[in-house]
Every structure is written in structure tokens, then in C-alpha cells.
Image (cartoon, rainbow, N blue to C red):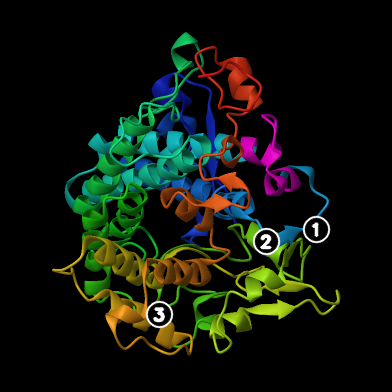
């Protein structure tokens, strides 16, 4: 598998090197692009976009730690981290410092991926018609999705109805071509970052077709709507959350797999996958396998207190299994395929639960379906009794259903924060449930301020 190497320096008088392999989403090998040709024709721009997909699928982003870090921060009685790696243990204990390696690696890789998308957007004039729209839409989708996870991890929570003028993360919307004083960008506010995320994802939704014409697992309009539903839910904008979730469900592009287990450890996307990072023997990362699976390190020990949250007949329990080599230790089976197991980012089941919750909160007239029908779609698939009357459940039941359905997929912390619950004795707004701005960034950029509880200039 050859590497696609893009040297962007000739076009932008820079010496930066983007190294990307298109094997994440496209197994056709590409020849190296010479520096003199970088971003001088349409093929170069499309190759940069492939590089952005590859970057976002890395182990520090959506191939692993962008899902694991929020779950580790949310862990109370759900699981123990029994591994020896210092960085993950700090995060699980909520004792991370501003030089934590995992928090630093994810920050660096996120901004590298954003810079690649900015470069693709900078080359749009080399494209025409539908092709231009597609590249712009996919690049803005990637950028919007990354900024959404950055703001949720590295800033204090968005407050519905509030000014949200607390420090967010730096917004970089043009390619970084050299490092000088202008590179020292301050943190935008939480409100400004959320506005940018919505703008990017809305543009992506409106620019992209419902099915991507290049590869089915590239972003499309429905993928953008699915992530928008997450954004609106996080903002407690329940009407827009249910509208976007309903758009995905009603498209007919996706269907729940026959069994819960069928939704995971797949070589190719299942019918339920709205967006997944592609993993193969040649490329892609599945760091979750390393930490969750008994076939690897098996550092995440699922506790009995978590198992007790499931109803006895719940088929989701079948994906939590006893470690064959450690008596009394249980593992999650969602990430057991090391070589070819795609990493799901967003599934149809989540859309049903988002629409159910948003409709429940907003009340009738409902969008798409009654909350009871959406909950029963999810419950019936895992062999649970379906609800008969709307009085059979309440908001707490919906939130528990969401927790158990999406457990170990990186959503628990974000749900805790938006519903203002707690992690053990820690309130949802505890400063240790926010990652630090990395030390290397604080040391090199005098315009950055640090989150509460961490070393550095306070905001």
C-alpha cells in the first residue's frame, strides 16, 4: 500500500508535509504527488480530501481516543481501567494533567486533520459543478465533526439559553502555511465554535447528495444530518434535533441489523452504520480493540454494577463476555475485530433514541413517530418487552435506554453533561471532566489560556 504524500509548500510557500494514505476509505493505491503539482489540479484537491479522511480515522481521533476519552472521563462504576499506561489511567481517575499524552495527541491530530480540510477547501476553485460541491461538503463535514468533538472535550459545557462566552477552542478556518506571530490564535468562545460547527455541517448537508457517488462510506447528506442531530441535542435544541434525526430515519437509507451483535465487528458497513471509519489490514486504526478486547490488552474491566443496569433478557448483555484468562473479569465485545473491524461513529439506533427523547421533551405534534414507537424499535431488536402505553416510561427510561444502547461508543460523558447529571461525586461541570489545553500549546502560544484546575494562564 503506497502512501499518498502531498507537499503543499510550493503552492503556499510552505515546507509543511501532509502524509496521508487513502487506504482508509479507498484501497486503490495512489502515486506520490510531486511538490510542484500540489493543489494545481482537481485530482490533487481530491487526494487532499482523502488525506483528511485518513487523518480523522487515526488512533488518536475517530479510530480510538475521541471515543475512549469521553467514556473514561464518564466512568464511575461502569468499568475499571486495569492497564499500566499512564495517560489513560490519569483520564479514568480524573487526575489528568496538562501534559497528558492522550489529550495532547488527540489535540495535535485534530488540528492536523482540520488543516488538511482547510487545504482542500482552499483548492475548490480547481473543481467544477457537482464535484466541487461534493468536495466542499465532505471537507466541511469533517471539519465540523472534529470541531464538535474538540469543543465537547476541551471546553466547559454549552449552556442552553446562556451567552456561552466561556473559552472554547481556537477556530482555524484557513490553511496554516507557516508558523509566525499570526499563528498564535486565541480560543474562540464556546458559542462561536458551536456556530461554526452548525454552519459547516449545514453546508455539508445541503451540498452533498443522499448517497455519496464516489464511495458509499464517504460522508453524504444524511451523515451530516445525523451529526447535526447530535449537535442540536447537545444544545438542548430538541426541535431541530428531532427534525435532523427524522430526516435520516425517513430516508430509508439505513435499517437496524437483525441482532445487536450484527452491528459490530464488521469488515464492511452494516445496514445500520450511518458513518464508520473503515479499517483494513492495510490501513485504518481500531485502538478500541487494543484496550477493550480480551484478545489484546484487555485493560477495560466491565463492572457488575454496570451489568446490573440491564434487564435480564436484554441481548445487549451478550456482547459483554467473561475474559477467558481472567476469572471474574468482563469485557465489552463491541471492538473485538482487530484487523478489519470498522469503528462505528454513528448508528441508526442512536437516531431513533434521539428522535424519541426530543419528541418526548417537545411533546406533540411529534416529528416522524411517537416516542413509544421509537423506543420499541430499539427494545424489540434486543429482545426486551415493548411498551404498551406512553405512561409505561419516562425521561429517565429513555436516557437509560440510550446509555445501554450506546455504551462504550463515546457518548456517555456528553449525555451526562447535557442533562446536567454527575459522574460519581463529580458534578457535570466539574473541571476535571474537561481535558486540558496541552502543555506544548500553552508554552508555544502566548494567546492561549488554560482550563480550570490545570497549570497555565487561567481564562
Which one is earlier in the sequence, the residue at label 2 or at label 3? 2
In this picture, residue 70 sits left or right of residue 246: right
Mark-to-mark CA distance, 3 and 1: 32 Å
Reply above or below: 379 against 227: below
Residue 37: x and y in percent read 41, 33
Q: Give me the C-alpha separation between circle 2 and circle 3.
A: 25 Å
Q: Are marks 3 and 1 in contact (CB under 8 Å)?
A: no
User: Mark 2 highlights which residue?
Assistant: 77
Which residues make up the magenta segment?
A: 88-104
Q: Residue furthest front?
A: 391
Which numbered circle lies on residue 378? Answer: 3
Q: Quadrant of residue 99?
A: top right
Residue pictured at 48% horizontal, 21% vertical:
14
Quadrant into which the N terminus falls: bottom right
Q: Residue at x 79, y 48 (%)?
A: 85
Closer to the N terminus: mark 2 or mark 1?
2
Q: Residue at x 42, y 83 (%)?
A: 379
Amino acid at each position: 500500500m503506497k502512501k499518498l504524500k502531498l507537499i503543499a509548500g510550493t503552492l503556499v510557500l510552505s515546507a509543511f508535509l501532509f502524509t496521508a494514505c487513502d487506504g482508509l476509505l479507498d484501497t486503490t493505491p495512489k502515486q506520490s504527488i510531486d511538490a510542484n503539482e500540489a493543489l494545481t489540479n482537481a485530482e490533487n484537491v481530491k487526494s487532499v480530501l482523502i488525506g483528511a479522511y485518513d487523518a480523522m480515522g487515526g488512533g488518536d481521533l475517530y479510530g480510538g481516543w475521541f471515543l475512549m476519552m469521553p467514556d473514561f472521563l464518564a466512568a464511575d462504576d461502569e468499568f475499571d481501567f486495569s492497564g499500566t499506561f499512564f495517560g489513560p489511567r490519569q483520564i479514568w481517575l480524573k487526575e489528568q494533567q496538562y501534559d497528558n499524552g492522550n489529550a495532547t495527541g488527540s489535540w495535535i491530530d485534530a488540528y492536523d486533520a482540520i488543516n488538511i480540510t482547510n487545504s482542500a477547501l482552499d483548492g475548490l476553485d480547481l473543481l467544477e459543478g457537482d464535484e466541487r460541491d461534493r468536495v466542499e461538503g465532505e471537507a466541511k463535514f469533517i471539519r465540523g465533526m472534529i470541531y464538535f468533538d474538540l469543543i465537547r472535550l476541551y471546553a466547559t459545557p454549552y449552556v442552553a439559553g446562556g451567552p456561552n462566552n466561556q473559552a472554547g477552542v481556537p477556530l482555524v478556518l484557513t490553511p496554516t502555511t507557516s508558523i509566525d506571530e499570526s499563528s498564535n490564535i486565541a480560543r474562540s468562545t464556546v458559542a462561536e465554535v458551536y456556530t461554526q460547527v452548525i454552519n459547516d455541517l449545514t453546508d455539508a448537508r445541503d451540498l452533498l447528495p443522499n448517497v455519496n457517488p464516489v464511495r458509499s462510506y464517504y460522508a453524504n447528506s444524511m451523515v451530516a444530518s445525523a451529526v447535526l442531530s447530535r449537535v442540536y441535542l447537545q444544545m438542548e435544541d430538541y426541535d431541530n434535533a428531532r427534525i435532523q434525526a427524522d430526516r435520516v430515519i425517513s430516508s430509508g437509507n439505513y435499517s437496524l441489523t437483525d441482532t445487536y451483535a450484527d452491528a459490530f465487528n464488521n469488515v464492511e458497513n452494516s445496514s445500520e452504520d450511518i458513518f464508520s471509519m473503515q479499517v483494513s489490514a492495510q490501513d485504518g486504526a481500531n485502538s478500541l480493540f487494543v484496550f477493550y478486547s480480551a484478545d489484546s490488552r484487555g485493560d477495560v474491566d466491565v463492572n457488575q454494577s454496570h451489568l446490573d443496569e440491564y434487564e435480564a433478557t436484554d441481548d445487549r448483555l451478550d456482547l459483554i463476555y467473561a475474559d477467558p484468562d481472567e476469572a471474574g473479569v468482563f469485557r465489552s465485545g463491541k471492538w473485538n475485530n482487530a484487523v478489519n473491524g470498522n469503528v462505528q461513529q454513528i448508528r441508526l439506533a442512536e437516531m431513533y433514541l434521539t428522535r424519541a427523547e426530543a419528541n418526548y421533551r417537545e411533546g406533540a405534534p411529534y416529528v416522524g413517530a411517537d416516542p413509544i414507537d421509537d423506543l420499541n424499535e430499539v427494545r424489540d431488536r434486543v429482545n426486551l418487552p415493548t411498551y404498551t402505553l406512553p405512561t409505561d416510561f419516562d425521561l429517565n427510561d429513555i436516557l437509560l435506554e440510550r446509555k445501554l444502547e450506546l455504551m462504550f461508543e463515546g457518548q456517555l460523558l456528553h449525555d451526562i453533561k447535557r442533562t446536567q447529571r454527575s459522574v460519581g461525586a463529580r458534578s457535570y461541570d466539574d473541571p476535571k471532566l474537561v481535558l486540558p489545553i496541552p502543555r506544548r500549546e500553552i508554552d508555544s502560544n502566548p494567546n492561549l489560556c488554560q482550563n480550570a484546575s490545570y497549570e497555565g494562564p487561567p481564562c
